[in-house]
Amino acid sequence: MANKQFHIPTSQGETFVVACGNPEGPPVILLHGGAANSVMWMSDIAAWAPEFRIFAADVIGESGLSTPARPALNSDDYGLWLDDVMGALSLARASFIGVSLGGWLALDYATRRPERVASLVAMCPGGVGRQKIGIALKIIPLRLRGRWGKHKAREIVLGRAPAGLSPGAQCFMDFLSLIYENFRPRWVKMAVFSDEYLKRLTMPVLAILGGKDVLLDSAETKRRLERTVPHAEIRYYPEMGHFIPGQTTAILEFLRRSAAATVSGLT
């Protein structure tokens, strides 16, 4: 797919962005999870790009081509970083799709700048349900046991890849294995959003959660969102973990509904 790749300056350093899709379509910013990069969206973008202008940003401090800066997660630095990203892209408002750490970043920005977020998709997001820090006690020793241990660590976090993955999703899983072999992920506790902050999410919200997530308490995430963001659409999969494939079409339909509501003046 035709795309533009470029670095933009921010207060934290350079940020790598891939831009593609319909130049006249509503803008959508993609934020990947920890120990990943924008490659994770390769199986989704083909479906979204004909209708939306897509900007996939490599999150700072992760395994992409952006600066290695890792500001504290309990600061406003990431909000300021996204201000810079949106300013460089000449965007006053955009929809956000975030996964895991990227979901936390999207939620953080949406609670700080709700007027700049047209709609929000949060897949297995941090910051709402309890973070299961104890999993690090299992993962860190495994990562010291060479390639096998690192593969096992990735499997514990994401679960075994289900059969029948699309070629794009399988390619990303293979790429993720390489990242886990060569990259040191951050094991930090993500700040938890208060009820007051979550109630600021007045834009259309779609949350996608896995009941067997080993990193986050998705049942608690579901309960808190139902209580504080009652208009949110929640897709809860009791048997899925931290990796939930097959959501491309559901997210596209949500983006379509949200964009139509915006045009109609409903949001």
Image (tube, rainbow, N blue to C red):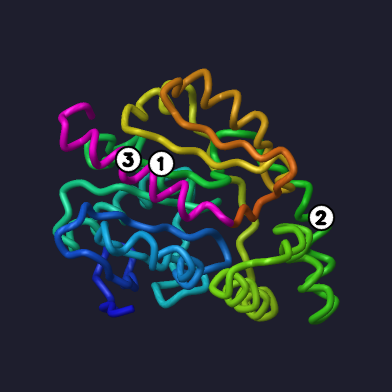
Instruction: Assess whether mark 2 and mark 3 are in contact (beta carbons under 8 angstroms).
Output: no
Disc number for residue 119: 3
Q: Residues within 10 Å of mark 3 (few under 14, many from 20)?
A: many
Residue at which label 2 appears? 137
Q: Is residue 2 left or right of residue 24?
A: right
Horizontal and vertical percent for residue 109? 35, 43
The residue at the point 56 percent across, 43 percent down is: 126
Q: Quadrant of residue 27?
A: bottom left
Instruction: Assess whether mark 1 and mark 2 are in contact (beta carbons under 8 angstroms).
Output: no
Instruction: Tell me, yes or no, whether the highlighted magenta stretch contains residue 219.
Output: no
Name the one closer to the observer, 243 or 116: 243
Against 198, residue 83 (above or below) is below
Residue at which label 1 appears? 108
The residue at the point 68 percent across, 37 percent down is: 217
Against 247, residue 115 (above or below) is above
Q: Residues within 10 Å of mark 1 (few under 14, many from 20)?
A: many
Horizontal and vertical percent for residue 26? 21, 52
Instruction: Please provide the residue range marked out in magenta.
Output: 246-267
| Element on which disc 3 rests | strand
Say which of marks 3 and 2 sits in front.
Answer: 3
Name the one closer to the observer, 17 or 236: 236
Name the one closer to the observer, 210 or 79: 210
Quadrant assignment for the C terminus = top left
Residue type at mark 2 is Leu
Residue type at mark 1 is Asp
